[in-house]
Amino acid sequence: MAKVSLKKRSEYSEKERIESGLIAVFPCFEAYKSFVQTDTGNTEPFIRLAVKNQIIEEESKEAFEIFIKDKCIPVEKRTAPAGLTFRKLVEDKNRTGLSGRALCNWLNRLIKDFELNILPAGKINNSMITRLKKHAADTCVRRNTLRLLSFWFGYKRLIL
């Protein structure tokens, strides 16, 4: 069995970090299809980000879909640690290193810097995070807030 050499977080290129963020948002093609069919469906910000960072060559939905299919994470590797809930994740500053407000600020900077405006209001506020701690992600805004949080985790390569 070959040894796996893991890089330190700082050794990943910006392209690798963005690719990791995109895969965290769309770990499988079904997650991508769900986004397109039931939520804003606006894949353009993600496609532009992938093209800008040379993750895909062509600015098209088809090229982005091929990328998602090629990078699909197997089901057995997509499970969260036992007992991990959104509330525990957000409240555990050892995992994120941030308070709820600081997390909102970071996510809003991410939306601006990477032009990932997939929310109707264009930004995340602290009450959105609070609602997600108490209620299911049963609205487009809540699901897209989780997608932005997923991008952040993938981009930062935080280990759950």
Image (cartoon, rainbow, N blue to C red):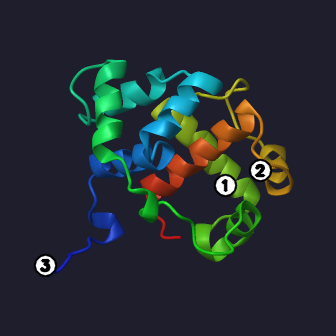
Q: CA distance from mark 1 to mark 2?
A: 9 Å
Local packing at callout 1 (Cα closer than 10 Å; few below 14, some 14-19, many 20+) is many
* Quadrant (top left, top right, bottom left, bottom right) of the N terminus: bottom left
The residue pinned by badge 3 equals: 2
Write down the quadrant of residue 92 in the picture. Answer: bottom right
> Residue 143 at x, y = what percent?
67, 39
Q: Residue at x 60, y 72 (%)?
A: 95
Q: Nearer the viewer, mark 2 or mark 3?
A: 3
Examine the rendered structure and indicate whether residue 103 appears above or below residue 28: below
Residue nearer the viewer, 62 or 110: 62
Q: Nearer the viewer, residue 160 or 34?
A: 34
Q: Is residue 99 above or below residue 140?
A: below
67 vs 125, left or right, is left
Looking at the image, residue 40 sits to the left or right of residue 132; the answer is: left
**Disc 1 or 2, which lies upstream in sequence?**
1
Residue position for label 2: 129
Q: Amino acid at mark 3?
A: Ala
Q: Which residue is mark 1?
A: 103
- Say if 20 sits above or below 96 in the image: above
Is mark 2 in CB contact (under 8 Å) with mark 3?
Answer: no
Which of the two labelled residues, at mark 2 and mark 3, occupies the earlier sequence position?
Answer: 3
Q: Residues within 10 Å of mark 2 (few under 14, many from 20)?
A: many
